[in-house]
Amino acid sequence: MKIQWLGHSAFHILTDNDINILIDPFLRDNPACPFDPEEVKADVICVTHGHNDHFGDAVELAKNNNALIVCNHEHSVYISQLGLETMGMNMGGTIEVAGIKITMVNAIHSSDMDFIDGIGPGGSSCGYILELENKRKIYHSGDTGIFGDMKTVIRDIYRPEIALIPIGDRYTMGIREATIAASWIEPEVIIPIHYNTFPPIEQDPYDFKDMVEKNTETKVTVLKPGETYQE
């Protein structure tokens, strides 16, 4: 399994069975992303919410790769009208695609589609629990503030070994809140996301790493855009 950070909240996950999963594929207009959409493979694309810095290049990537887009119901209606394959979900639901179990979980954030004229309703923002073929679970929180489900639903029910959570503040949790979230979720590894892409979310990820590793058993892996965490 390889987990490659593409900058901001975008990830490319290559599973043991060579399934390419993209999450929040904001690539072309992402100043931190080292790749163009044409360079990235996708079998499944998961979108957490409708803001352009997360929905990103999902449509182009789906067309280029004949990929399935997994998203909330409202986004799936929009995407299906474009003639693309999509699978809409809602909170607490689980689907299975190519041997991967995908569960949609709550997030505290807005989700209107801000990349279309006039801004369109985008349903609820979400996170995902991905259970891969090897049974390892990855939690991508999407954009979110800290909330109690991290201690109960996320930890007690799903128990992810790897968590991808934001630290950028202003639009999401900052370092203080993300450190508390780390103690609630109790994953083996956290990869911090959604920071330093733009000036309003500038943070030092090593401050986060120090705080988490001083106060929990969790290890924090700080990646540069394009770098990979591998198991």
Image (cartoon, rainbow, N blue to C red):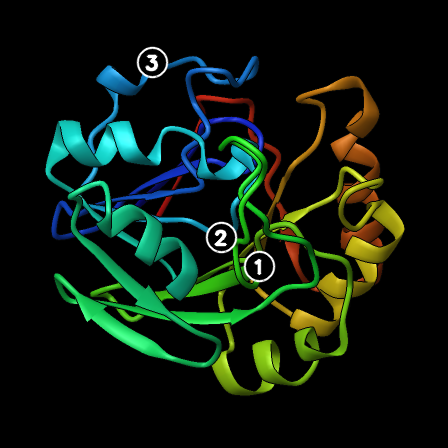
Residue 27 picture location, percent across and down: 43, 22
Q: Residue at x 76, y 71 (%)?
A: 147
Question: Does dot 1 land on a helix, a strand or a loop?
Answer: loop
Q: Contact (CB < 8 A) between labels 3 and 1?
A: no
- Residue 45, compared with residue 87, is above or below; it is above
Discs 3/1, front: 1
Alpha carbon distance from label 3 to label 1: 26 Å
Residue 180 picture location, percent across and down: 82, 63
The residue where tag 2 is placed is 48
Residue 78 picture location, percent across and down: 34, 49
Q: Which residue lies furthest to the right in this view?
A: 176
Task: Indicate which disc, 2 or 3, sits on the residue closer to the N terminus.
Answer: 3
Question: Does dot 3 land on a helix, a strand or a loop?
Answer: loop
Q: What residue type is labelled 3?
A: Asp
Q: Counting other residues with Cα less than 10 Å from the Cα at mark 3, is it few (<14), some (14-19), or many (20 or more)?
A: few
Q: Contact (CB < 8 A) between labels 2 and 3?
A: no
Q: Contact (CB < 8 A) between labels 1 and 2?
A: yes
The residue where tag 3 is placed is 36
- Residue 135, compared with residue 28, is above or below; it is below
Mark number displayed over residue 125: 1
Can you tell which quarter of the image residue 129 is in? bottom left
Q: Which amino acid does label 1 sit on?
A: Ser
